[in-house]
Image: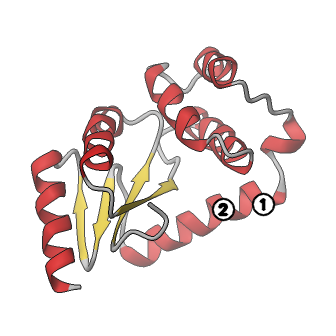
Amino acid sequence: NPDGDVTLVVFTDYACTFCRASMNDIERLLREDRNLKIVYREFPILSPESEAAARLALVAAQRGRYQPMHRALFMANQPDSAGRAAAASQVGVTADAAALNAGTISAELDSNRSFARALGINGTPTWIVGDRLMTGAVGYQALRQAIAEARSAG
């Protein structure tokens, strides 16, 4: 919900198994809480393949297909070239080198890295809810509790 009363920010990397495991928690939260806003911050820190996948996800976002691409990239298990190709085919988003390396894509990744540095974030997944920062696969209950606390403080 772009107008949600609580925002959950998640820094994520497609090579991160904990991020992949957390995907179901996010989807459950979105199904159950219509007033929740999720902001994904592509934070490819684990491998060069992570950055290539993040760039593909951002191209998909420009075309209104971020969520399906996000899910498809995680379902591919690895952000390698085969996984990226399978995700792109599944979602119906193609991207050439020019699109993947566009200035807007690079600027978004640079912005996410700067934001993470400013907050002392150096791992994924990292979550921000209200004024609370949590790192790791904290699970559905911890996220739900943090959202409830942010909502009551709001």
Q: Which residue lies furthest to the front in this view?
A: 34
Please provide percent x and percent y for residue 30.
Answer: 33, 48
Along the viewing direction, whichever of 144 and 132 lies nearer the viewer: 144
Along the viewing direction, whichever of 137 and 33 lies nearer the viewer: 33
Left or right: 41 as drawn, with respect to 123: right
Q: Quadrant of residue 111?
A: bottom right
Please provide percent x and percent y for residue 114.
Answer: 55, 72
Please provide percent x and percent y for residue 153.
Answer: 17, 85
Q: Quadrant of residue 109?
A: bottom right
Along the viewing direction, whichever of 110 and 70 lies nearer the viewer: 70
Image quarter hosting the C terminus: bottom left
Number of numbered tags placed on the structure image:
2
Left or right: 123 as drawn, with respect to 97: left
Give the alpha-carbon distance from disc 1 to disc 2, as whole Å.
6 Å
Q: Residue at x 84, y 43 (%)?
A: 99
- Type of the residue with mark 1: Thr
Q: Are marks 1 and 2 in contact (CB under 8 Å)?
A: yes
- Compared to residue 69, the image places residue 54 above or below, namely below
For label 1, the residue is 104
**Mark 2: few/some/many CA within 10 Å (<14, 14-19, 20+):** some
Q: Residue at x 78, y 60 (%)?
A: 104
> Circle 2 sits in a helix, a strand or a loop, which is it?
helix
Q: Which residue lies furthest to the right in this view?
A: 98
- Compared to residue 139, the image places residue 3 above or below, namely below
- Type of the residue with mark 2: Glu
For label 2, the residue is 108
Please provide percent x and percent y for residue 142.
Answer: 12, 55
